[in-house]
Image (cartoon, coloured by chain):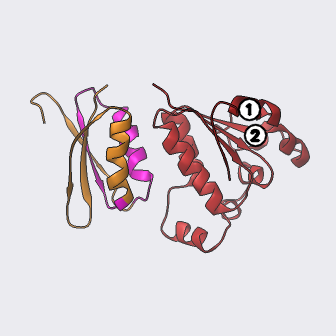
Chain colours: A orange, B red
């Protein structure tokens, strides 16, 4: 995370596709360019789909890590 | 740059098909792809504002699973697609007439208006067309 950016956490564990993606997109509307959102998702499909969406609409994937029964997906708002 | 527009013709009142339509429409719309959904035949009744919730989502074995597992609500997905992307929803004017409904009989905030099939088909000529 860059020194000036902020990170918001969205806990979407338990939500099925495309719930976590929709929560991420709604969250991105509320933050500034350069800030980040960490989505927690237990949905395996979303762990694949969110990076694909980020690539398609030209935001930035910061990282994705598998935790105990869920994924942590960090996205930076790029535009 | 926006992608090839997507046109969805929704005719079925089956929950699984409604869910798939809502998933495709919402995800495409938030992925910079213009989407138009044309609702006709039995599907129109699902969008009645007075249709009871327990009558709205009827289907087969997978419908039961969708409800048991609390999958995202189909109408809410359409709403999110409209809020977060370029998604337009049209009620088939013929189906409204047959049903004896006006646009005001449908759930508020989802539909952009009533539309004839000819106009929808004409608009869809340069996009991808899906029927559910």
Q: Nearer the viewer, residue A71 or B104?
A: A71
Q: Which residue is mark 2?
A: B91
Do the CB atoms of the residues marked 1 and 2 lie less than 8 Å apart?
yes
For label 2, the crowd category at 10 Å Cα-Cα, with few meaning under 14, some 14 to 19 and many 20 or more, is many
Looking at the rendered structure, the number of numbered marks drawn on it comes to: 2
Q: Earlier in the sequence, mark 1 or mark 2?
A: 2
Residue at position x 38%, y 58% in the image: A45
For residue A31, side relative to residue B68 (left or right) = left
Spatial CA span between label 1 and label 2: 6 Å
Magenta residues?
A15-44
Residue B108, picture quadrant: top right
Image coords of residue A75 (percent x, y): 26, 40
**Chain letter, disc 1 residue:** B
For residue B114, side relative to residue B130 (left or right) = right
**Chain letter, disc 2 residue:** B
Q: Is residue B77 above or below residue B72?
A: above
For residue A35, side relative to residue B56 (left or right) = left
State yes or no: residue B50 in magenta. no
Residue A42 visible in the current orientation: yes
Image coords of residue B28 (percent x, y): 51, 41
Q: Secondary structure at mark 1?
A: strand
Residues behind callouts 1 and 2 on a single chain: yes
> Furthest residue to the bottom?
B61
State yes or no: residue A40 in magenta. yes
Query: Tag on residue B113?
Result: 1
């Amino acid at each position: 995370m860059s020194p000036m950016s902020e990170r918001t956490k969205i806990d979407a564990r338990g939500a099925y596709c495309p719930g976590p993606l929709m929560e991420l997109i709604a969250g991105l509307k509320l933050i500034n360019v350069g800030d980040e959102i960490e989505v927690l998702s237990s949905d395996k499909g979303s762990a694949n789909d969110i990076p694909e969406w980020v690539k398609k609409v030209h935001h930035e994937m910061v990282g994705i890590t598998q935790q105990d029964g869920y994924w942590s997906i960090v996205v930076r708002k790029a535009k | 740059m926006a992608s090839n527009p997507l046109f969805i013709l929704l005719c079925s009142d089956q929950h699984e098909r409604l869910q798939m339509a809502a998933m495709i429409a919402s995800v495409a719309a938030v992925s910079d792809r213009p989407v138009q959904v044309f609702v006709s035949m039995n599907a129109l009744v699902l969008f009645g504002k007075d249709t009871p919730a327990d009558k709205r989502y009827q289907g087969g074995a997978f419908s039961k699973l969708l409800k048991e597992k609390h999958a995202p609500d189909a109408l809410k997905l359409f709403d999110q697609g409209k809020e977060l992307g370029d998604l337009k929803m049209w009620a088939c004017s013929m189906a409204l007439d047959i049903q004896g409904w006006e646009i005001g009989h449908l759930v508020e905030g989802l539909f952009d208006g009533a539309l004839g099939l000819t106009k929808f088909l004409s608009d869809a000529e340069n996009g991808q067309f899906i029927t559910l």
